[in-house]
Image (tube, rainbow, N blue to C red):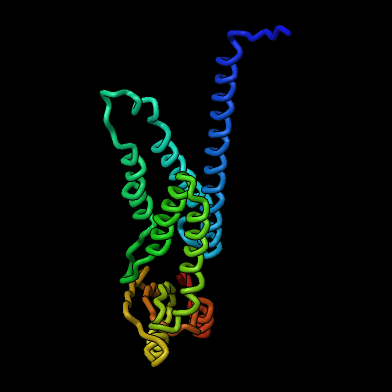
Amino acid sequence: MYIYKSKHFFPQTIKNRKETERMMLNMDFVLRLLVAGILGAIIGLDREYRAKEAGYRTHFLVSLGSALIMIVSQYGFQEIIKESSVTLDPSRVAAQVVSGIGFIGAGTIIFQKQIVRGLTTAAGIWATAGIGLAVGAGMYTIGIAAMVLTLVGLELLSYLFKSIGMKSSLVSFSTANRDTLKQIADRFNSKDYLIVSYEMETLHPGESEFYQVTMVIKSKRNNDEGHLLSLIQEFPDVTVQRIE
């Protein structure tokens, strides 16, 4: 029996195999981006729920972008590396994420009235970038575990250790009664509270003058912002602008 073998059969098979491998690799890249974005969004939802500066969209983009840069770092220079005259370190591209993410984190940190705010959110963004790098490298288990531990650090540890020390709150209010200011100061200078910063500004001097007060109060764990608001509103002629 005569069997005909085309001379184009084997090259065509190799070409098809390479195209299939390339397609499978691209699908894996898309999966990495998707998983990285989801993990980042989960952390961002926690921050969004806490009304922090960076929410789920920021964390989603940070994790997604970090995964993308890691993929490019690993696979984007394969053709260049094959050249014998070219020497480079592809990991340098991914390494820049760690330092570059500091600019985003710095934008969430605010120092105001002896209180530093946004530091935990900035650290969360930095951790989210690390998670994106891990998933971008194909380390799904490490990325998921890091996401879970990040949520533990943001929520569970805060719940377990909030009894240690005192919590600082920034309070801003106004009143036209100067005697009320003294009563409020006396109320919060007690064993449960400590006024660490007090600033008063007299607005519209004259017949209709009133006083704008901004102070930082340290309180024990059971006294949150809502409780502080109710305490201040017990005083007459007081308008609360902000508590955080």
* Count of numbered circles in the view: 0
Q: Please, is residue 16 above or below residue 89 in the view?
A: above
Regarding residue 124, the answer to whether it shows in the image is: yes
Q: Please, is residue 141 above or below residue 206 in the view?
A: above
Q: Which quarter of the figure has residue 187?
A: bottom left
Write the residue at 31% across / 41% down.
92
Q: Quadrant of the C terminus?
A: bottom left
| Residue nearest the observer in this picture, 55 or 196 | 55
Q: Please, is residue 90 above or below residue 226 in the view?
A: above
Give coordinates of residue 136: x percent, y percent: 47, 44
Write the residue at 32% across / 23% down.
83
Regarding residue 207, the answer to whether it shows in the image is: no
Q: Which quarter of the figure has residue 212?
A: bottom left
Q: Please, is residue 223 above or below residue 91 in the view?
A: below
| Residue nearest the observer in this picture, 221 or 27 | 27
Q: Is residue 145 left or right of residue 72?
A: right
Give coordinates of residue 143: x percent, y percent: 49, 54
Give coordinates of residue 107: x percent, y percent: 36, 53
In this view, which residue lies farthest toward the bottom? 191
Q: Quadrant of the N terminus?
A: top right
In this view, which residue lies farthest toward the right? 1
Write the residue at 36% across / 60% down.
109
In this view, which residue lies farthest toward the front? 1
Q: Is residue 32 left or right of residue 218?
A: right
Q: Is residue 64 left or right of residue 106?
A: right
| Residue nearest the observer in this picture, 132 or 231 | 132
